[in-house]
Amino acid sequence: MRGVLWIARAHIMTALREKGTLFWFIIFPVFLLVLLALMFGRIGNVGEMNFDLGLVNLDTASSTATVDFAAIVERAFEELGKRPALLKEPLFTLHRPSSGDDAEAFLKGEENMLRLGRRAAVVVIPKGFSEQVRAHAMPSSFSGSTATPASPAGETILVYYTKGSDASELASSIVEQVLARVNQEVLAQAGLFRSQETVPVETRFIGGKEIRYVDFLLPGVILMGFFTNGLFGVPGAILFSRDRRILKSYWVTPLSVGRYLAGFSLGHLALCLLQFILLALLGRFAFGARVSFAQPIPVLYLLLGALTFMAFGFLIAAVVRTANAGMALANLLNLPMMFLSGLFFQVGGLPSFLKVVVYANPVSYLAEGLRTSLGIGTGQFSETLTFAVPLAWIAVCVLIASRRLSWDVVR
Amino acid sequence: MRNAGEILMRVTGLVKRYGAVCAVDAISFVVPRASVFTILGPNGAGKTTTLEMLEGIREPDGGEIEVFGAKLKRVTRGVRERMGVLLQDGNFEPYLRVRETVALFASFFRRALPVDDVLSSLSLEDKKRAAVRTLSGGQRQRLAVAVALVNDPELIFLDEPTTGLDPQARRNMWSIVTDLKRRGKTIILTTHYMEEAEALSDHVCIMDQGRIIAEGSPRELASGLGQETIIEFVASRLRPADLEELGHCGKAARVDGERVTLNTDDLVRTMEALLAWSKERGIPLANMTVRQPNLEDVFLSLTGRRLRE
């Protein structure tokens, strides 16, 4: 037992002292978590979204009118252009013509900016807007619409956006909601709208609670960390030690292959545990992840994941001759196994030939099993399958490795 | 301590083939306890293959090994507990420290010496916190010896222990081997340095092309060449005819670059003839030495080749 523990200790110490291994074990998964959480994790969070919005008021003549409806609309957007709190982003960064600018020329410029993707949307208050609203909305109203005039009276506010840009479509939808609220206020003031008579609407997520991206991401990054450790770390360490005749030095002692592999596996699992703790702490305290892994089923999935990928590592070590060939094979398996698995993105809409990879890939079952057990989304596979497929892969890998893994000497 | 002179290992008809090549061709020898048994031979003679079969990491294709009084088909865990091995091409984890490496190997044995005692016996205390990758060649080899000795073995295999070491480190290794022998250890050593075999061995086996071509103590082997004396000198601008004339001075003459070696059974007559030849031809005899034959000469006389050719 002492030999097993010492082999485990040597494996851990070597991994933590070698810069290359340390990068793949610790730095890469941490970097990936930080990068993906920063890129996608803030979408949908108030105070962490900001759109560039062009706002052009062509109704400057209305300033003499008793009620300047154009100014009301402008003020609504101005409010949303203010920073809600220190360190928070305002919803809109407004781009408006300065006093003395030709508004028509400014509008042309803003349309151009929209085409170039430097504006999410452009809102245009047309000439004579206030006058017409007063004529029709008192007691009539005005309406907001996207580019198409919705009212024959001509008091339409134009919202330009670009199709195909998520940011632009999201911004235009928010602008429409803002205008609808302004519209309600005007109608309410005119006594034509009573908010208590509206039908209440509430949006709910299937699965019972809202899923935040960081909660979806964190289990995926943890599994990816185990995956990288298994696919690269295991064959790398075994083949390097074999090629450098480090293992040969062990084989002239009473150490058996079984004891060596037990120690190696123990060390590998300890490294996975260390990596898990680091990522879970970072996810919770730096990105506010609420997902809790301290439950029996998620722990089982994590252990199964670490063992499955370790078995793949043994398989790679068994079918190649050198450490370089091992790294090449690991790279070849890495991309399809990692990305055709739902680890980071949903894979529902893939073509059939790629779905075959998804269904054969143990990562798909582990990712889904772990997420479902954590209450993050629902799965397409049964719980039995999410355990059975990785276990079957472990059996296949261990069987091949036990027959093919060469120690270069008689063992 | 058991009796010196007792047979610790007996090898009979050991064979190893790699395809059509017979790397070790039915060799037999015995290793007495508390002695240094050396297998001397050029690179590719089959020394390492022989040792690796005795260490249990190569399977023999034929023959029999008897060690510690038991005949073995395979080297067992029990035998490994009693032996220590310094491999020719062995290596250690480069990122582990010296003390950690010795402790790691100590953990593989049921019984091991205190790690710090082993380190101090090999003057490695100062380096115990150094990473293996930072060690010099000599320090690394001392670490390999420390690892081989950590279980206080009765039988120690040292495969080319001084290859690649500088003269100082080589001398250090020699004193380690001498000390081990003094402590009653049995050492099986391979080398292609005849000085090493002469300096350390009680018994030498000369191996060439998978076979044992001579064996005995260094003195016995050298005396096998009879009463011969070797005269060596440096002479430049020699013609083929000069070599023939020199051959008449002694028993046999060889030229290796500008270095001339003459074997003779009659030193006085040969010296007189040689000096006369030098005067007549006007060729000075620079750096002349007269010596008794050594293991290199034995190998040369048996194979017609030098050990390091």
Image (tube, rainbow, N blue to C red):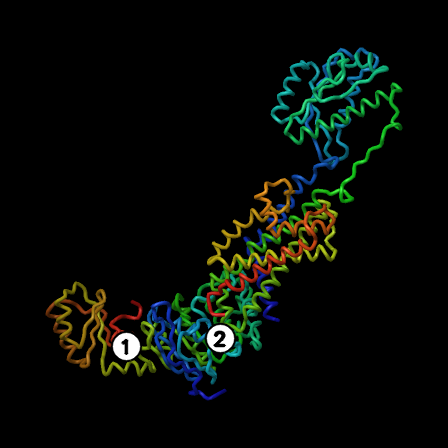
Residue B242: percent from left, percent from top: 13, 68
Q: Quadrant of residue B228?
A: bottom left
Relative to A120, residue A97 above or below: above
Q: Position of residue A268 (x, y in %)?
A: 60, 60
Expressed as whole percent of the image width and height from the top left, the position of residue A24 reads: 58, 51
| Circle nearer the N terminus (1, 2) | 2
The answer to which image quadrant residue A306 occupies is bottom right
Residue A191 placement, left or right of A102? right
* Amino acid on which the number 1 mark rests in the picture: Val
Relative to A351, say whether B157 is above or below.
below
Q: Foreground: B239 or A52?
A: A52
Q: Are marks 1 and 2 in contact (CB under 8 Å)?
A: no
In the displayed structure image, the side of residue B291 where residue B198 appears, left or right: right
Which residue in the structure is indicated by mark 2? B84
Please provide percent x and percent y for residue A334: 56, 49
Q: Amino acid at mark 2?
A: Gly
Query: Badge 2: few (under 14), some or many (20 or more) residues near its Cα, within 10 Å?
Result: many
Q: Which mark is residue B36?
A: none
Instruction: Check disc 2 and report its element: helix, strand or loop.
Output: strand
Residue placed most toward the observer, B33 or A241: A241
In the picture, the quarter occupied by the N terminus of chain A is bottom right
Q: In front here: A337 or B281? A: A337
According to the picture, the residue beneath numbered tag 1 turns out to be B298
Q: Is residue B245 left or right of residue A394?
A: left
Total residue callouts: 2
